[in-house]
Image (cartoon, helix red, strand yellow):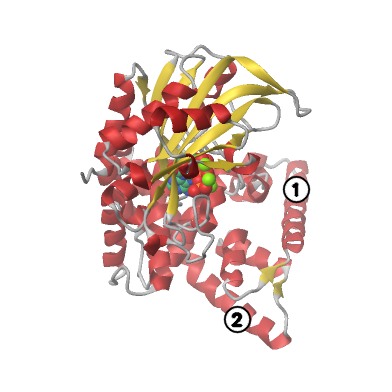
Amino acid sequence: KNYGVNELRRMFLEFFESKEHLAMKSFSLVPHNDNSLLLINSGMAPLKPYFTGQEIPPRRRVTTCQKCIRTGDIENVGKTARHGTFFEMLGNFSFGDYFKDEAIHWSWEFLTGVIGLDPDRLYPSVYLEDDEAFEIWNKKIGIAPERIFRFGKADNFWEHGAGPCGPCSEIYYDRGEKYGCGSPDCTVGCDCDRYMEVWNNVFTQFENDGHGNYEELAQKNIDTGMGLERLAVVVQDVDSIFDVDTIKALLNRVAALARTEYKKNADVDVSLRLITDHVRSCTFMISDGIMPSNEGRGYVLRRLLRRAARHGRLLGIEGKFLADLSTTVIELSKDGYPELEEKKAMILKVLTQEEDKFNKTIDQGLAILGELEEEMVKKGETILSGENAFKLYDTYGFPLDLTLEILEEKNFGVDEEGFKAAMQKQRETARNARKTTNYMGADVTVYQSIDPAITTEFIGYDKLICDSKI
Ligand code: ATP
Ligand code: MG
Ligand code: MG
Ligand code: MG
């Protein structure tokens, strides 16, 4: 049956409620008391205190649909069928309660029984040494041994330095040959979009002492994650996460604004999907109180927003368009996230202001970058100087990553060290100016508010990679 995204979210939560789980609301994208993570990137991340025993969970069985951001997947967005920077992760969790047997049985029951997926298209994977999980899939669920894949640590063992860790078992869905890469070796685990990873079941059963010694945990946990959009892809039998009911409606709106059609031109399609994804990310980030800035989360937001604005230009969209699209995101997702509707005015205002700011300089910036490129071609250079990249950043609001990305399309690069040096130099100049001002007895705070280089520690580039396996 062809269930919609909003329906699938409900079905999942209700299924695990019927297995005595407490359904909790999605946590904010902003981590709470957790400096190890810039943005929530899995269902498990906000529940960490329950896993470590730091806090007592409201119940030992919990289920959520968690908003997630993975900037680590940004390069994939629009290019693969299955990656967004924003997505929703469905999950069921056990804090020292049930373990492998129940987790595997229930994931199978949900996919084949409740949703009605064809069992012959599903393939589980287990960790190389996890015979227990293998036996459950084989003996109890009845999957033939050759259909169960054994993978190594990189794919099927969840570990984050010292601490609780364990093997995982993932469930893949064969979407058919037309989505394959064509390689004779293409099978489960291939990076193409044929065998799509749908669900990850993590069995936290060991404690790593940090020196590679593993001890069985007294309290074993279950932590699972399934992309809601990916589930919808296989249920609705569509090409990608951008073709499922809700997201497709948003993409159609982007195409209408750009006066173009989807699936006519490959480059146009990448831009359409990218804008669709980034508007979702930006809308949800702002609704959780993140503001565009030059550092940390605010930088991620600014980068996504400006990237979307630039791709709008590529598609020939004139004027501001992000707030318009955001209203569609809110309409389509308020079912699961009522806060979107509540914060609507604020979301639209932030988007409009930031887009305005960028629009004032984007055309000039793009023109200047074009000239710089021409000069580089003439001189036979391939690396843009750090000073020029900094000028684009400082005067035209181009985040370094955006400049990098535009140049990469032509196989050019940027002197990133030079960029950092130019940034440092400007900061020192500003600091000296502040000292002088201070000496003269002026109100320093007035000065700070007009010079972001003084108040803002620039850490965006080092902190951007916040992606990790669940
Ligand atoms: P992949 O190998 O396809 O990149 P992953 O192994 O990185 O996925 P996990 O960290 O295991 O993903 O996350 C659990 C589930 O969340 C995945 O099985 C998938 O359904 C979903 N998921 C992960 N990353 C994304 C993404 N960028 N966009 C949409 N869904 C995602
Ligand atoms: Mg991944
Ligand atoms: Mg994977
Ligand atoms: Mg995985």
- In the picture, measured across the screen, residue 281 lies left or right of residue 109, that is right
Q: How many callouts does the rendering have?
A: 2
Label 1 secondary element: helix
Given residues 383 and 196, the one toward you in this image is 196
Distance (Cα) linking label 1 and label 2: 32 Å
| Quarter of the rendering occupied by the C terminus | top right
Q: Secondary structure at mark 2?
A: helix
Of pointers 1 and 2, the one earlier in the residue sequence = 2
User: Which residue type carries mark 1?
Assistant: Arg
Q: Depth check: 273 or 346 in front?
A: 273
Residue at point 37% right, 23% down? 24
Q: Amino acid at mark 2?
A: Glu
In the rendering, at what x and y percent does residue 178 appear? 37, 64
- Spot the residue most to the bottom: 378
Q: Position of residue 257 (x, y in %)?
A: 29, 66
Quadrant of the image containing the N terminus: top left
Check if mark 1's residue and mark 2's residue have beta carbons within 8 Å: no
Q: Nearer the viewer, mark 1 or mark 2?
A: 2
Residue 282 seen in the current view: yes
Where is residue 118 drawn, in percent x and y?
30, 44
Corner quadrant of residue 22: top left
Identity of the residue drawn at 59% across and 45% down: 449
Which residue was labeled with disc 2?
371
* Dot 1 beta carbon under 8 Å from ligand 1: no
Residue 431 numbered mark, or none: 1
Please determine whether, in this image, residue 245 is positioned above or below residue 199: below
How far across and down, in percent of the image, does residue 319 sit? Answer: 35, 66
Q: Residue at x 52, y 64 (%)?
A: 184
